[in-house]
Image (tube, helix red, strand yellow):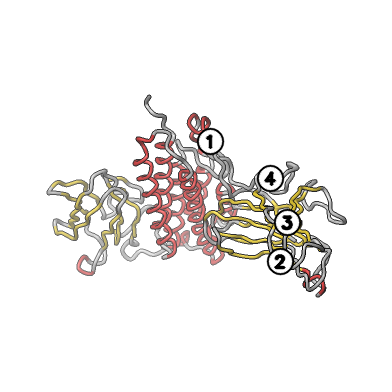
Amino acid sequence: MKVFKQANLVRIVILAAMAVLVCPNAILAKPGLDNPSFEIGDLSGWNKDILGGGVIRVVTNFYSYVPKDGAYFAWLLGYTPGSYTTLSQTFYASAGSTISGWAFFDTWDYMPFNDNAYVQIKSGVNVLATVFSKSVFDVEEGAYDEKWTEWTYTFTEEGTYTLEAGVANYLDYAGFSFLGIDGVVLTVQEPKVLKQDIIDQLGMYAHESKRIRKAIREIEKSLEDKLWTDNFHLKLKGGKKVLDRERHAARELIHLLKGIPDDGKCGGISLIELEYTGSKPIDVDVYLKNVLLGSFPVEEGDTFVVEATEETGGKLHPEIKLVSDGIELANIHTSCSKPINIDDEHGDFIIVDLDKLLPKNGKKGKKHQISDEAQVAVEIAIEQLVKVDRLLAEIQLNDARLLDPADSVRQDKFEHEIAKAEKELAKGDEDRDDYKLGKAIHHYKKVWEHATRAIKEATKLPKS
């Protein structure tokens, strides 16, 4: 049999309705399973099915079996032939989460009365994995060892899952068989802890590059307690700063790998990606030296790319103009004569990605050359920053999805923000899979922002 053990995260629990309205930052408790090791002394948090006449109890021992975690474990007995006595719990898990536990199977029966038991991970009605399975046949074949068996499963996608354990008699009502469950643990890497791990890894190579040291400082600033509700949630007010800091850190590391000097010098811009933040849909005409490069229909949140061509000499001209209906909306200097960076705002446009060129005849200075070990550490750190940002975005979005607006008038706005968040999540995943990690981080930041707006809409009280 298998045992289940609880630990750090994964399930979302809504607090009392009044607490939600009074304190939006306290909408959700830390994700986790309910009563995973049965230490309450009962089956609180679990769903039981004994329609077949079986028995489910929380016990302190069963013959030689004692708890694997704490003082109690769950004990199941099957009765009606072919009808499973089951115990289950549904929970939320993010990609990379791991659930583990312990189980045992014991029997008083013999073949051909092949009683059996299982522990499964399910998505809806679909069985993703049978992590524990034993039967009377196994006992007679010597697979029965009168000990707890440990099991584990890692989730590859975020979603809602069910842990189900069951035991059944076979052919007769006699010769009962038993299943034991204990110590269920659902573990998800905590975003705040993950970030500290990134700092520790980069710290080993901080002496090799100024950019690595800058990245570490940005991540450290993002860990300020005043910006976090707990290790999983950012505060609604100010939490955006954490994601900005992480983008800055990732930018430093990406530029390091590209060999861009950290003294701010560059030889021009070959690509610039802009996000439109205005509230009304428009057509944006992009001009380089008064020559129309292209037109882009955009609405709030859309991005578009302005890229150099052979005709432009492989880099953008000193400035680009953004025009709509004959009105100049922004003028962006791309000659590097003025500082230009990701996150710069130009009217209703934000720079979300840049490709800078090295100065003419420029080479990476000695201080920009890092060891192979440092390069590997930097590459891993960037991927981990992407993972952290997605996890933060994912948690916030799932928090929002669980809510119903207190004021029905705000339902449309609430759903609109949820839809925008889901759209940005898909864009982020697409960029991550294409290894456009800087862009992926930007989209995950937008997921968090839209989900946060949805939470604010849901928790506003009716004016009456």
Q: Which amino acid does label 1 sit on?
A: Ala
Mark 2, secondary structure of its residue = strand
Depth order, front residue of 9/204: 9
User: Foreground mark, 3 or 1?
Assistant: 3
Question: What is the distance, in whole Å, between disc 4 and disc 1 at their CAs?
Answer: 21 Å
The image shows residue 3 at horizontal and vertical percentages of 73, 56
Say whether marks 4 and 1 touch (CB < 8 Å). no
Mark 2 lies on residue: 133
Q: Name the residue at 80% across, 61% down.
A: 176
Depth order, front residue of 186/228: 186
Of callouts 2 and 3, which one flags the residue occurring earlier in the amino acid sequence? Answer: 3
The image shows residue 346 at horizontal and vertical percentages of 27, 45
Position of residue 304 in the picture relative to residue 200 (left or right): left
Of callouts 4 and 1, which one flags the residue occurring earlier in the amino acid sequence? Answer: 1
Task: Sort mark 4 into few (<14), some (14-19) or many (20+) by Cα contacts within 10 Å.
Answer: some
Quick check: 14 above or below 260?
above
Of callouts 3 and 4, which one flags the residue occurring earlier in the amino acid sequence? Answer: 3
Q: Which amino acid does label 4 sit on?
A: Asn
Of callouts 3 and 1, which one flags the residue occurring earlier in the amino acid sequence? Answer: 3
Q: What residue type is labelled 2?
A: Ser
Mark 3 lies on residue: 3
User: Foreground mark, 4 or 1?
Assistant: 4
Task: Sort mark 1 into few (<14), some (14-19) or many (20+) by Cα contacts within 10 Å.
Answer: some
Of callouts 4 and 2, which one flags the residue occurring earlier in the amino acid sequence? Answer: 4
Mark 1 lies on residue: 26
Mark 4 lies on residue: 35
